[in-house]
Image (cartoon, rainbow, N blue to C red):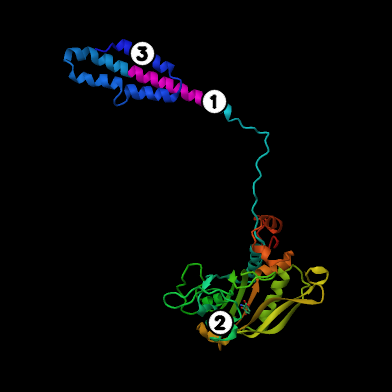
Amino acid sequence: MTDLNQLQADLSNQIAAAPDAATLEAIRVATLGKTGSVSALLKTLGSMSPEVRKLQGPAINALRDQVAAQLLARKSDFEAAELEARLAREQVDLTLPSPQRRKGSVHPTMQTMDEMVSIFAEMGFAVAEGPDIEDDFHNFTALNFPPKHPAREMHDTFFFNPGADGERKLLRTHTSPVQVRAMRRGNTAPPAPWIAAGQEPPIRIIVPGRTYRLDSDATHTPMFHQVEGLVIDKGIHMGHLKWTLETFISRFFETDAVMTRFRPHHFPFTEPSAEMDVGCDRSGGEIRIGTGSDWLEILGCGMVHPNVLRNCGIDPDVYQGFAFGMGVDRLGMLKYGMPDLRDMFASDTRWLAHFGFSAFQAPNPVSGLS
Ligand code: DAH
């Protein structure tokens, strides 16, 4: 029979001498583990006679309890020592300078768009949106672009490969297709909740969004931004269009001195159509608005073509409307003096830090636009 006192003394010495937590764990497994020595002793109880078990039972159980208690005590010694060591190691040096945090900024295009939205919101316009991936119907056909007509090629369109049904989707070349979505009677279940549903006139919307054309130079990028405007009501005429745009331009450039000029133009979806220029000064290598004798084209506009109204289920003998579309990035460049459109989308953080706006200064008509 094992000498329990001897065994206990041996184990006690081993536990006391264990240099680290891993050794201690090995001792625990070798004694109290499933096949450990103390566990083996406990198993012998079953085969003992009742008289022997009466003596041995309490003794072996006491040995098990003592070994377990000693292991636990030693383990918490190790844990306390480890904690002490970590606390000593992980000192915080409060005199160190804190790490530089990167500060994000609002992109000039988004700032410009927010400014435009806030000015038009003040005039009673609601914001409508449409998908970037459009179909031929919304981007061209419903807007009165004749089939196979060169006007259709006017925009250098990015087309997708035709789908199984032969339909060729495209990246919208302008925000004008959202006019169609907003006007169409029967368009009551748009493909996504944020896409404009057809409304009953009167309609007064602006449409900020991304647009795409195969074009790239100092004043063109393949992706750019437009804000579209649409007003449909009874008795709408060019005078409303002129007032709205002139009011917008002087609010946007924050001066009453802005001169505007409407030049006849052609768009398939408006009749008559015009381009609006603002008076500017180009001397000295930069463009300044509100002074000078030069003109700069800013936007396209016109009275909504009766065919477009008909395509959308609106009776042109009852309702008229005007529409306009302008390049957000270009107007932002003009306002904030950025020379090259391509820089806007180059993701150069130095450029963004220089031209970006604080997120805490969202433009609004009360506290100011910029
Ligand atoms: N969609 C035109 C373009 O991208 C801009 C435009 C012109 C929009 C006249 C209009 C409009 O709504 O009436 O060039």
Quadrant in which the C terminus is drawn? bottom right
Which SS class for mark 3? helix
Q: Which residue is mark 3?
A: 10
Mark 1 or mark 2, which is nearer the start of the sequence?
1
Amino acid type assigned to the residue bearing label 3 in the image? Asp
Q: Residue sitting at 50 percent across and 25 percent down? A: 82
Residue 117 sits above or below residue 40 on the image: below
Q: Nearer the viewer, mark 1 or mark 3?
A: 3
Q: Earlier in the sequence, mark 3 or mark 2?
A: 3
Q: Position of residue 44 (x, y in %)?
A: 22, 19
Residue 143 - label: 2
Q: Nearer the viewer, mark 2 or mark 1?
A: 1
Looking at the image, residue 326 sits to the left or right of residue 260; the answer is left
For the residue pair 243 and 214, the one nearer the viewer reads as: 214
Q: Is residue 11 above or below residue 85?
A: above
- Magenta span of residues: 65-82
Residue 245: image quadrant is bottom right
Q: Which residue is mark 1?
A: 85
Magenta stretch: includes residue 73: yes
Residue type pointed to by label 2: Leu
Decide: is 267 above or below 174.
below
Q: Nearer the viewer, mark 3 or mark 2?
A: 3
